[in-house]
Amino acid sequence: MDIKHLQYFLEVARLNSFSRAADELFITQPTISKMIKNLEEELGVVLFDRSRKQLALTDAGRIILEHAKLVDHAMKNLSTDLDNLFGLKKGHIRIGLPPIFDAHDFLKIVGKFHEKYSGITFQLVEDGSKKIEEAVQNNLLDVGIVVLPTKLELFDYFSILEEDLMLILPESHPLANREEVNLVELAQESFILFNKDFALNDRIILSCNNLGFQPTIISESSQQNFIKEMVSYQLGIALLPESISLDLPDNVKAIRVVNPTISWHLAIIWSKEQYLSYAAKEWLNFTKQELAKR
């Protein structure tokens, strides 16, 4: 038995099909069928019930599936550890970041790291905090930038930014000439929010509920520029982080919100349970050091 036998078995089990697994692995169906048959003969058990219309694992197949997953996972970790031996000459870091985040300073840090370790590549994935947390937890991302609070039982983190939300409204709005606005004064306004994958959405709604009103939401989006454009066309008002409230359309203003202020606290998280590559650990240390200089 070699690792390929187990990997082919895992693929057939995942897809419940010899033909689909063969297509996924770019081999012929007779080849993968023979490999599985050889594995069954070596182990002395039948792994799949082939009598049904849809392929199904036998009891023995289900037990071996769990062990095969562990072996496959160990082999992937071995590959990562071997990369570490090359002194960060190669590696890959998967980072999740929210599209509402002003990434200018963040990308400067990524650029400096790349100058130092040119063989390490990056995958940057934009999504809301909830989706990023889920991806980090499931090892689809190594690290992610999210809005605090996060799930402390699952993630380690360090803070990178804290700022207040600003009221974004058309310059023709009756409140546009004010220096600050009480949140309760927005009770009758139409809100444009980020979609439900964004923790900021929950933060805004909770702050309104604490003052006794449910905000009227006329639209949701995942794109900050689209929200700004909707405000410019007088479709509603929005609450955006201060750092992304500096670049607004000409007919849109940003005003401070008080009583209460709504803060936006960003942090970089990583899983307490998933393996973190040496490249990712080095990037986290490098980022901490760069942020400490500011």
Image (cartoon, rainbow, N blue to C red):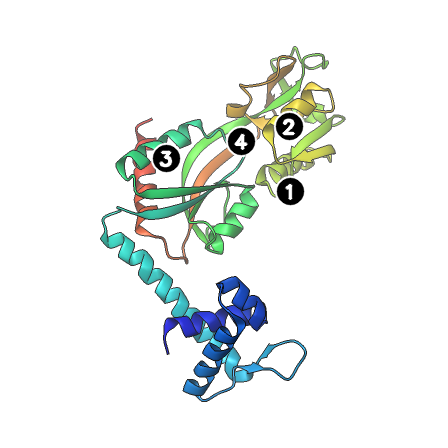
Which circle's residue, 3 or 1, is located before the other in the chain? 3
List x then y, in percent, for residue 39. 44, 81
Q: Which of the labelled discs sits on residue 121, or is there none? A: none
- The residue pinned by badge 3 equals 110
List x then y, in percent, for residue 291. 34, 32
- The residue pinned by badge 4 equals 263
Q: Which of the labelled discs sits on residue 196, or is there none? A: 1
Q: Of 229 and 242, which appears nearest the observer?
A: 229
Q: Is the residue 272 above or below the residue 157 in the image?
A: below
- The residue pinned by badge 2 equals 226
Q: CA distance from mark 3 to mark 1?
A: 28 Å
Which circle's residue, 2 or 3, is located before the other in the chain? 3
- Closer to us: mark 4 or mark 1? 1
Q: Residue at x 41, y 34 (%)?
A: 160
- Closer to us: mark 4 or mark 3? 3
Classify 10 Å Cα crowding around label 2: few (below 14), some (14-19), many (20 and above).
Answer: few
Q: Is the residue 104 above or below the residue 26 in the image?
A: above
Q: Is the residue 45 above or below the residue 198 in the image?
A: below
Q: Quadrant of the C terminus?
A: top left
